[in-house]
Amino acid sequence: MEKSLFGIPNSDVYIVSFILVFFVVLEVVNGYLDRSNKKRSDWIQEFGGYLALGLTIKPAIIFTAMYLGMTFFPSYKYAISEMNFLFGLLGYLLIDDLLQYWYHRSAHEYQFLWKLHRPHHQAEEMGFFISYRNAWLYYVLMPNIWWVGIIVFLGGAKAVALGLILKQLVIIGSHSTIHWDKFLYERKGLTPILKVLERIFITPAFHHAHHGKSKVDGVGNPNGNFGNMFSIWDQLFGTAQFKHALPQEYGLPNDPKEHWTAAYFYPFVTSKNKESEISRGYKKEKTATIEPIDVKLEKGKKYLWCQCGLSKTQPFCDGSHHGTKKQPLVFEAKRTGEARICNCKITKTGPFCDNSHVQLKEI
Ligand code: FES
């Protein structure tokens, strides 16, 4: 069964391509190319990733899922083809989005997946093409693409076709530099509309926060806002943060650059830069110590206290927590002067030492 809408085979592909071109024109007219500092390797990763995904990875996965279905479960072929269209569409989208939420979240919490997803967060400027910037293997393992193949096999191709268009509209919009939600949060009278919309769909402000370099600007939320199309999962699982502003900086706090071939083909190609997480044999060392560290703080300045124990700039965070379930704690200094900051990471009055480390010495 072909994915077709309006009687046109693969019409979703044409419509999604149209949406992409539409956003390209909007971004270019909006001065994107003049502002952009993207390098050749960024374009290769983003545009090349887009072509590889659409022309090889997705078709291969969908074909494989259908082949496996027909081989092992032939009686289920087109089993849901008589299902109510809207019911099928909603079911496809909700399950798809739940799978994506957990896959994406796992890619921030587990080292191996993080290394595949990391190129997406190395982008130092937003733009919808960065949605296609991940390692090749990240897409191969992505449950959503397999989910498309399963639904097509079961006979829900039309629901998939419309679902992919709606999804892409939200995803491209949320990565784009065209902040369609800005006019809603800049006009007080329209804010209630935004408040309803953002509780359901991912808005540019919500997703841009996820790409923020750190939480220190009060907007960035790199360890949250994981949603893809709907924000309901972030709200349900406690990772949502709604701010009507954009982060000051995008990218990773500590980014030893590597060649795009390593970023895209990891683990089959590794980085020659020994500082890179994707170099051969790289290991994050524990840097937490039992003793606290005395540091000079400046009144009113915000700091990120490392809670994962892996930072090379203890007691502060340097971004090494990416790929773990830990994240830093933001705090603002109340006065200028020396402070005793916990470095054993078990204090109950973080970031300040409460002498809990004494217990560790006694063990
Ligand atoms: S390096 Fe960020 S929490 Fe440890």
Image (tube, helix red, strand yellow):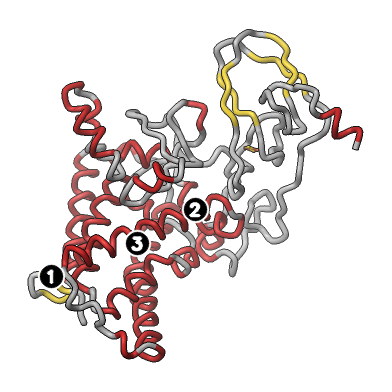
Foreground label between 1 and 2: 1
* Residue sitting at x 91%, y 33%: 362
Q: Which mark is residue 5?
A: 1
Determine the CA span between mark 1 and mark 2.
34 Å
Q: Which sits earlier in the primary sequence, circle 2 or circle 3?
A: 3
Asked if disc 2 and disc 3 are in contact, CB closer than 8 Å, the reply is no
Q: Which mark is residue 119?
A: 2
Describe residue 248's horizontal placement relative to residue 23 as left or right: right
Residue kind at label 2, given as amino acid type? Pro
- Residue 104 in the image: above or below residue 88: above
SS class, disc 3: helix
Q: Which residue is at the front of the view, 51 or 221?
A: 221
Q: Which residue is at the front of the view, 70 or 285?
A: 70
Q: Say which quarter of the image contains residue 317.
A: top right
Q: Which mark is residue 96?
A: 3
Residue kind at label 1, given as amino acid type? Leu
Q: Which x, y percent locates residue 342?
A: 74, 26
* Residue sitting at x 33%, y 75%: 149
